[in-house]
Image: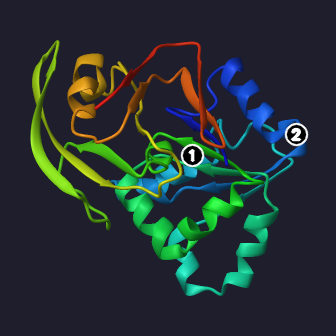
Amino acid sequence: MKLLLTSAGIKNDSIRNALVDLLGKPITESSALYIPTAIYPFPGGAAMAWRLIHGPLCELGWKSLGVLELTALPSIQEDCWVPMLKETDTLLVGGGDPLYLCHWMRQSGLADLLPSQLRETVYVGVSAGSMAAAATFGETYRDPRRGSGESLTSEDIVFATPQGEISRILVTAQGVGLVDFALIPHLDHEDHPDASLANAEKWAARLPMPTYAIDDQTAIKVIDGAVEVVSEGHWKRFTP
């Protein structure tokens, strides 16, 4: 299987080169399908989905680009979308709520197809799209969740920040099991104070497998289980 798990997409030349290496050909000769599903269980999710579809990841110069909306798939016959999936070079899995994303990956049947599909297709995850690739992942929420998806555990947790303590709901949940590690995106990003290095360590301690905390200039490249960190920024690997 071939995966490129990012925090914020193709943010620098190193990550872009890793994508081209996984594709085995230029982006301009490659097809892609974008999955916006994870963004919907947020206020204004529909507008955010539109911005993401017209955002940098989808505008890399793909030969062709389509949208694969997972919530629609259970209501249509597989011959309407599975052939298209099998023909695409790249699956772009966007950010948002990873629990909601995993729920619809399973409900749609995509999760069952991915292990065989990724022998040919490159999985590119962004934030929640990367987190969902794990067998088990952890995510934090400011408020109670607004979408489908069952957690394994849920706890109130307090994180330290330079501005003082912040309270979050930390959940663990079952991912789709494409990789044997977990991922915490947006390391040390000013808009994600719960993902500072110290807080990421506290977060990772709740997970039963190695966990990579990566910033927006970093990605994890995986080929048949072999892991390579691609970075122009910083990252840290935590072990249980």
Above/below status of 62 relative to 11? below
What amino acid type should be assigned to the residue bearing mark 2?
Answer: Thr
Label number found at residue 28 = 2
Where is residue 99 shown, x and y percent of the image?
Answer: 35, 57
Where is residue 161 shown, x and y percent of the image?
Answer: 17, 18
Q: In this view, does 147 lie to the left or right of 221?
A: left
Where is residue 49 shown, x and y percent of the image?
Answer: 52, 53
Q: Nearer the viewer, residue 57 or 21?
A: 21
Where is residue 56 shown, x and y percent of the image?
Answer: 65, 35
Q: Is residue 96 left or right of residue 22?
A: left
Label 1 residue SS: helix
Q: Residue at x 76, y 25 (%)?
A: 17
Report how far apart the C-alphas of labels 1 and 2 lie in the structure. 19 Å
Above/below status of 234 relative to 89? above
The residue under label 1 is: 52
Label number found at residue 15 = none
Q: Nearer the viewer, residue 50 or 7?
A: 7
Earlier residue among tags 1 and 2: 2
Q: Is residue 38 left or right of residue 200?
A: right
The reply to whether residue 67 is in sight is no
What amino acid type should be assigned to the residue bearing mark 1?
Answer: Leu
The reply to whether residue 90 is in sight is yes
Give the class, few, some or many, for how many residues have Cα within 10 Å of label 1's Cα (few <14, many ≥20): some
